[in-house]
Image (cartoon, rainbow, N blue to C red):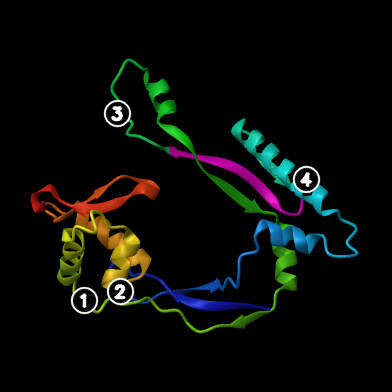
Amino acid sequence: MAKYFKQEMPDLRNTGEKKFYYRMKVNENIDFDELVRRLTYPGSGLDKGQVVQVIAAIGKQMSLEMASGNSVTIDGIGTFRASVGMTMPKDLTGSDTGKETNARSLKVTGIIYRAASQLVRTISSQCTLVRDKEHRLRKSPYSKEERIGLAVGYLSDGAHPFMRVGDYARLTRQSHCAASRELQEISRTPLSPIRRDGRASALVYVLSREQL
């Protein structure tokens, strides 16, 4: 039995209109060891060591195939292929040609997975859905000016030389999504007291030089 809930969507365009979508609630994450344990139950006829070796070999071969520009399809599971993205600005200076510069600016950034239709049908036939409570967006009790003030106060403390999105979300009592969007907006504002530093997983927010 699985639970689903209705999730309120953020109002990105500030229209004042509330929109919702449905999501399945994740009860727990089944890690590798637990998955192997469930596969090799007594009477399954499967050897734990062999199952571990086969799964590891599949993962290794899949990475080699996708690194070579191939997609990989596993019957009953789906198709996997690598995606690429920018790692540095395109306007690099140097003697490299445009083609070489573009290649240097790209790297594999993720894996795109398309589920097999048979897998979707099988999951649907085995799944009994039960409604869970509705999930609404957390509204901050502070105004935007107050939220900026809280962030500046946090960064002005010597114990906090930088601030992550999660820190701002806790300070201002917003959802992570709303906090991330607002920090991006604040940091792009001229004469903002806060600027962004780093990128991707290393992205943090710090006081602008004028505030130091």
**Residue occupied by mark 2:** 173
Residue 99 painted magenta: no
Who comes first in sequence, dot 1 or dot 3? 3
* Residue 30 position in % (x across, y down): 65, 63
Tell me the CA gap for discs 1 and 4.
54 Å
**Residue occupied by mark 4:** 54
- Callout 4–callout 3 Cβ contact below 8 Å: no
Tell me the CA gap for discs 2 and 3.
39 Å
Who comes first in sequence, dot 4 or dot 2? 4
Tell me the CA gap for discs 1 and 3.
41 Å
Circle 3 SS class: loop
Who comes first in sequence, dot 1 or dot 2? 1
* Residue 5 position in % (x across, y down): 53, 78
Report the magenta residues as a range. Answer: 75-85
Tell me the CA gap for discs 1 and 2.
8 Å
In this rendering, is residue 20 above or below 81?
below
Q: Is residue 12 visible?
A: no
Circle 4 SS class: helix
Left or right: 111, with 105 as reference point: right
User: Which label was assigned to residue 142?
Assistant: 1
Q: Residue furthest top?
A: 95
Q: Amino acid at mark 4?
A: Val
| Residue shown at the point (20%, 69%) measured from the top left | 147
Q: Is residue 115 visible?
A: yes
